[in-house]
């Protein structure tokens, strides 16, 4: 079976001082700048959601999280 020598991911990486998710710094660029739903979409799709995508996904995610 074929096995890569050095696996590579484009999702995230880190060093001693930073965590990088899809090329953006988690602490400096993402936390406090994106909603949870925006971040999940960014992580899955690799780009920030458009206003149309957000307007569809946000109500669906809120409805699915409402357990009351």
Image (cartoon, rainbow, N blue to C red):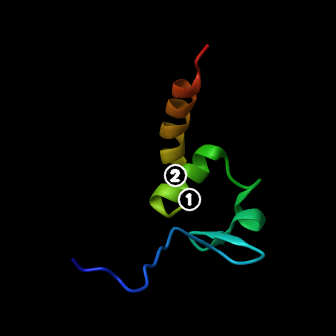
**Quick one: SS at disc 2?**
helix
- Locate the C terminus and report the quarter of the image it occupies: top right
Marks 1 and 2 sit apart, C-alpha to C-alpha, by: 7 Å
Depth check: 12 or 54 in front? 12
| 35 vs 21: above or below | above
| 10 vs 31: above or below | below
Image x and y of residue 66, in percent: 59, 21
**Quick one: SS at disc 1?**
loop
Q: In this view, does 30 lie to the left or right of 66?
A: right
- Residue 35 is tagged as none
Q: Name the residue under label 1.
A: 48
Depth check: 32 or 49 in front? 32
Depth check: 6 or 33 in front? 6
Q: In this view, does 38 lie to the left or right of 9?
A: right
Q: Which residue is drawn at 24% across and 80% down?
A: 2
- Residue 41 is tagged as 2
């Amino acid at each position: 079976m074929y096995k890569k020598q050095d696996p590579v991911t484009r999702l995230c990486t880190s060093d001693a001082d930073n965590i990088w998710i899809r090329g953006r710094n988690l602490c400096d660029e993402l936390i406090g700048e994106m909603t949870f739903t925006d971040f999940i979409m960014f992580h899955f799709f690799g780009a920030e959601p458009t206003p149309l995508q957000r307007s569809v996904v946000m109500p669906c995610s809120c409805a699915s999280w409402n357990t009351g």
